[in-house]
Image: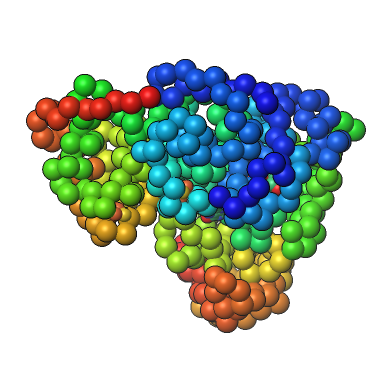
Amino acid sequence: MRAYLPDYQCSSANSLSEAFSFLEKGARPIAGGTDIMVLFDAGLLAPGDYVDILGISELKGITKKRNTLTLGALTTYSEVRQHKFLQTNFPILCESAKEVGAVAIQNRGTLGGNIANASPAADFPPALLVYEAKIHLVSSRGMRTIDYTKFHHGYKESELKKDELIHSVSLENHLSKHHHFWRKIGSRKAQAISKTMMAGVLKINKNVIEEVRISFGSVAPTAVRCTEVEKFLTGCPLNKNTIREAKQILLKDIHPIDDIRSTGKYRLAVSQNVLEEFLCGIG
Amino acid sequence: MKKLALTVNGKKYLLSPHPFSRLLDVLREDLKLTGTKEGCGEGECGACSVMLDGKLVNSCLVPVLQADGKQILTVEGLAKKYLTPIQESFLNCGGAQCGICTPGMLMAAYALNRNNKKPTQQEIREGLGGNLCRCTGYCQIIESVQKVGKTKPSTRKGKSRS
Ligand SMILES: Cc1cc2nc3c(=O)[nH]c(=O)nc-3n(C[C@H](O)[C@H](O)[C@H](O)COP(=O)(O)OP(=O)(O)OC[C@H]3O[C@@H](n4cnc5c(N)ncnc54)[C@H](O)[C@@H]3O)c2cc1C
Ligand code: FES
Ligand code: FES
C-alpha cells in the first residue's frame, strides 16, 4: 500500500443528515470503495477527510411504485443482477452489472459510485441513457431531480455539487415491446474495463423502426446518446442499406480516442460492427 | 481512535486501527492472520478475498471502518476439525502449486458453493473470474471446484485459527 495513512481521516455516517454535516465540512463520500480504494492503494487518493455512507438506509434498496422503479444509490451490481423485475423489464442494467469486474467487485461496487466517479468507461451510464433515467440528488438544501442525460457535463465533470449525494435513480417501465441490447468489448470477460460498449432499445412495426435509442460508452468524454443515428433510423425500414448508412452516421455521434486500453481506430470500427450486430439481430 | 468490533472466524476483537487501514492489513498485521494474501492491492487479483457478512469481497479495497460490527471469514476459518471438502478437493486435484492464489481461490469457491452446490464449468469460471493464478493454468482449479464433495470426507486435520 502506497498511501500515507495519517494523511486521511474517515468517519461513518448513519443517516443523511449526519452525512451532510460531514460533507459541509469538506469530507468526500466513500461507498463501496472500489474506485476510491484503488486510488488509495496506489497512493493517488487526495488526502483529507472522507465519510463512509454505506450505512445510510435512505440510500439503499430497489422499490417499485406503479410504473416507476427506484434504485437507491447504494444498490450494488449483485443486487441489480439478481433483481427479477429488472431482469424482465430493464435487462440491459442486469447484463451490464453482470459484466462489471467479478463477483467481489459486484458485491461492493454501487450504482451511485459508478455514476459519481464519472468515468467515460463506466458500465451503467449507457443503460441509464437508453432507459431515460432520472437522477435524484440530495443535500441539506433538499432533493432535486434531473434527467440523467443532463447529469454528465464532460470528462469527469458532472452536475453533482461537493455537498450533495446521489440519492437514487428512477426508471419508467414502458419498454415491454422493445428489443433490448447490450454489448461490452473488453480484453477479457472478467475484470475488464471496456474498449467500447453499446446499449440499445428498439421497437419495430412491420419492419419499420418505430422507436430507437442507442448509447455508447468509452468512445467520448462521457457516455453518449447517438441522436444522429437515432434520428436517421426512426421511420426507416430495417434492411441492409439502412444498416450500412447508420454505421456511417455513427461517426457524427462518437469520437473515440487512443488511450491505454485501445486505439481510436479500433474503437470506431468495432463500435460500427456492434451497431450492425444490434440492428441485424432484430426481426 | 474509535474502537471497532470485528468478528473474525467466529472470534470477537475490539481494535483501534486507523479507520482507513485496509481490512487486509488489519487481518495480516494486527491479527496475524497471514493466510489472506496481497497480490495486486487494487482489486484485480483476488488473492485478498475474504467473506464480509456473507459476501465475497477484496479485503484490499475495504477500509476497516466499514467492517465495524461485521462478521469476517478468512481462509483460516474454513477448516474445523478436518479440512473442508473444498480444501480436500484442491489437494486431490492439484488445485494449488505455489499457493499464493490459493486462499483467495478457496474463498471464491466457498462463496460460489454456498449458493450453488453443482456449479457448471461456466459458473465456476464466472465465480472465480476475479482470481488470478500464475501457476496452474486454471484447469486444475476448475476441476477442484467441480469435484468438491465427490471424494470421501477429509481425514486431514484442520488447523482452524482465529
Ligand atoms: C477490479 C475492478 C474492476 C472494475 N470493473 C469495472 C467495470 O467493468 N465496469 C465499471 O463500470 N466499473 C468497474 N470498476 C469500477 C467500480 O467498481 C465502479 O465504478 C463502482 O460502481 C464504484 O462504486 P463504489 O461504491 O465502489 O464507489 P466508491 O469507490 O466508494 O466511490 C467512487 C466515487 O463516487 C463518489 N460517490 C460514491 N457514492 C456516492 C453517492 N451516493 N453520491 C455522491 N458521490 C458518491 C465517491 O466520492 C467517489 O468519488 C472496477 C473496479 C475494480 C477495482
Ligand atoms: S490484493 Fe486485493 S485483489 Fe489483488
Ligand atoms: S498456485 Fe501459484 S499463483 Fe496460483
Observer-nearest of A282 and A129: A129
Residue B140 in view, yes or no: yes
User: In screen coordinates, is B115 left or right of A6?
Assistant: left
Residue in view at x 86 percent, y 36 percent? A25
- Residue A244: give x, y in percent of width and height: 56, 80
> Where is the C terminus of chain B found, in terms of image quarters?
top left
Q: Is residue A38 above or below residue A58?
A: below
Quadrant for residue A219, please give it: bottom right
Q: Residue B11's quadrant in the figure?
A: top left
User: Could you tell whether B158 is left or right of A157 in the image?
Assistant: left
The residue depicted at 51 percent of the width and 34 percent of the height is B26
On the image, the x and y values in percent for residue A234 come to 66, 66
Task: Tell me: residue A23, above or below residue A55.
Answer: below
> In the visual, does B139 lie left or right of A214?
left
Whether residue A215 is visible to the viewer of this picture, yes or no, is no
- Near-viewer residue (B137 or A81): B137
Furthest-right residue in this view: A141
Q: Residue B74 in the image: state x and y as whole percent.
A: 39, 32
Q: Position of residue B83 (x, y in %)?
A: 21, 30
Q: How is the image coloured?
A: rainbow
Q: Nearer the viewer, residue A184 or B105?
A: B105
